[in-house]
Image (cartoon, helix red, strand yellow):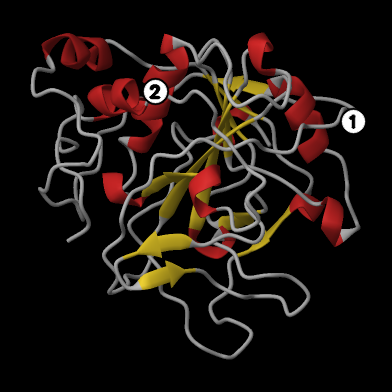
Amino acid sequence: MNDAEVPAAQVPSEDAASTDSTPMNEWSISAPTASTDAKTVDAKTVEPAPQSASSDALASEPSPVAPPSSHSSATLAVANYTPRQEAAPADPTNYGDRYATDIYGNALNNDWLIVLHETVGTADAAIRTFQTPHPNDDDQVSYHTLIRLDGTIVYIVPPEKRAYGAGNSAFMTANGLETVKTDARFPPSVNNFAYHISLETPPTGYHDNFTHGGYTREQYQSLAWLIARTPVPDDRITTHEAVDQSGSRMDPRSFDAQQFLTLLHAYPGRNVNRAG
């Protein structure tokens, strides 16, 4: 991939079909499997071009974790913030196509869902894992995007592809669990309609404890910048822990939802949070 081929923000577009469900956001915090070291990191730096935040498909009910109404400092922060960006493409064995039908032949038209993760190890270790070929289905893993401790956004899997970020998972909505079964060998998951974003874990989090020292201001700024460029409303932003059905995930641990939402809502069109 040439630097010129990397867009300013590789994020979901508004092309995803809609559902009739009304989701209920859960700000949980979940522990992912630690990344294993592999071979090389091929990260290409690109200069970001400015983009306007998308505000379509957003409505106006308060989030269950909505920040205070005063956003003057956050508004100033986002107005002057543009993150550094890189491309580090995953090996094709670690992601796939999004399915148009499930294994039963039912058409799939789910809205986008953003799932937040953490790496547990370093960003580079995670990237090496994603860039290592994994012919065995059980070993395949990826995120769409990773955010380093310094706020650098790393694009790993194109948003139109299906990253393998949350096996055995479902999203709770007012109408029940939203999940899709695309392979008879594996439990259903949210992967077919999810956009997976991972935060690099700080060194204080290289363990299996429930908490750590937390993420950097730059990571929250970049996360808000990235999500502000999607049509995904607040109540379809969730965590790996919240969607996990195995009971084994805690990521992203020590996530400050209040800080993130304050920054996100400072973007034009993002002071509303619910799907229409």
Q: Residue extending furthest bottom?
A: 105
User: Which numbered disc flags the more N-terminal residue, 2 or 1?
Assistant: 1
Q: Residue at x 58, y 47 (%)?
A: 158
Instruction: Say which quadrant the C terminus sits in.
Output: bottom left
Residue 38 coordinates in the image, percent (x, y): 89, 30
Q: Residue at x 73, y 80 (%)?
A: 184
Residue tagged 2: 256
Residue tagged 1: 38
Residue 121 coordinates in the image, percent (x, y): 73, 22
Number of callouts in the render?
2
Residue 148 coordinates in the image, percent (x, y): 58, 18
Between circles 2 and 1, the one closer to the viewer is 2
Local SS, label 2: loop
Whether residue 90 is visible: yes
Q: Is residue 238 above or below residue 2?
A: below
Q: Is residue 263 above or below residue 190?
A: above
Instruction: Say which quadrant the N terminus sits in.
Output: top right
Mark 1, Cα crowd under 10 Å, few <14 / some 14-19 / many 20+, is some
Local SS, label 1: loop
Q: Residue at x 86, y 40 (%)?
A: 132
Decide which of 173, 144 is in the foreground and name it: 173
Residue 154 coordinates in the image, percent (x, y): 59, 28
Amino acid type at image mark 2? Asp
Using residue 171 as the reference point, say whether residue 227 is left or right of it: left
